[in-house]
Amino acid sequence: MQRTIVALVLAAAVLAVGGCNSRTDKSAGSVILSVTDFDGLPTRASVNGSDLLTLDSIDIDNVAKDPNGTTSDLQNVEMRSYEVVYSRADTGTRVPTSLVRSIFGVAPVGGNVTYDNLPIMAAEQLRNPPLNDLLFENGGIDSETGSTVITITFTMRFFGRTLAGDDVATAPIRFDVEFVP
């Protein structure tokens, strides 16, 4: 009986010590990309005037999955692209086509990369349905809902690859923008 208790105590100790080093993220690679800050997020925009909607700046951190482990330059991430997928936050169903763009830059392990004036919507989205309904020359009203406001949810992700060859991506970030004539 005493041997069983000692064996159970030892097994619990091994599990507890082993659990301290486990990571919560089980994706491939040894780093996580994380959007940590963005400035200049538009909450309301007019479709009349500009053919481009941008974020003033956005920071992407490269975080080692094992904060107590050693790191190397092979964990640096070469940024490759980003995508913005749109959905309706109002009662409409029509959505702009997705925006996918190539980007360049390196997010060093334990550091970050910042992009300024990053396009989040271009003419291909602003000048086509449903947003082109809000153009003055088209009447300024969403033909699907009858509203003068279209609320779009933006879902953004960034993609890169470590120098060791592991593909990594940020978790999606979401925000809403109201479009008006």
Image: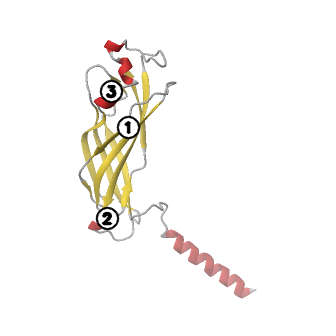
Query: Which residue is identified by label 3?
Result: 126
Q: CA distance from mark 2 to mark 1?
A: 30 Å
Instruction: Kindly identify the residue that appears in the image at 45 percent across and 17 percent down.
Output: 143
Q: Earlier in the sequence, mark 3 or mark 2?
A: 2
- Mark 1, Cα crowd under 10 Å, few <14 / some 14-19 / many 20+, is some
- Considering the numbered disc 3 on the image, is that residue within a helix, a strand or a loop? helix
Quarter of the figure with the C terminus: top left
- Vertical side of 14 occupied by 50: above or below: above
Q: Is residue 42 found left or right of 26 in the rendered image?
A: left
Viewer-closest of 100 and 43:
100
Quarter of the figure with the N terminus: bottom right
Query: Which residue is identified by label 1?
Result: 98
Q: Measured from the top left, where is residue 13 in percent x and y?
A: 58, 77
- Considering the numbered disc 1 on the image, is that residue within a helix, a strand or a loop? loop
Query: Which residue is identified by label 2?
Result: 75
Q: Measured from the top left, where is residue 19 in percent x and y?
A: 53, 70
- Mark 2, Cα crowd under 10 Å, few <14 / some 14-19 / many 20+, is many
Instruction: Kindly identify the residue that appears in the image at 33 percent across and 64 percent down.
Output: 165
- Vertical side of 22 occupied by 129: above or below: above
> Which amino acid lies under the numbered mark 1 shown in the image of this protein?
Ser
Q: Measured from the top left, where is residue 141 in percent x and y?
A: 41, 15
- Vertical side of 65 occupied by 104: above or below: above
The residue at the far bottom in this view is: 3
> Which amino acid lies under the numbered mark 2 shown in the image of this protein?
Gln
Q: CA distance from mark 3 to mark 2?
A: 38 Å
Q: How many marks?
A: 3
> Which amino acid lies under the numbered mark 3 shown in the image of this protein?
Leu
Give the quarter of the image for residue 76.
bottom left
Q: Is residue 117 found left or right of 16 in the rendered image?
A: left
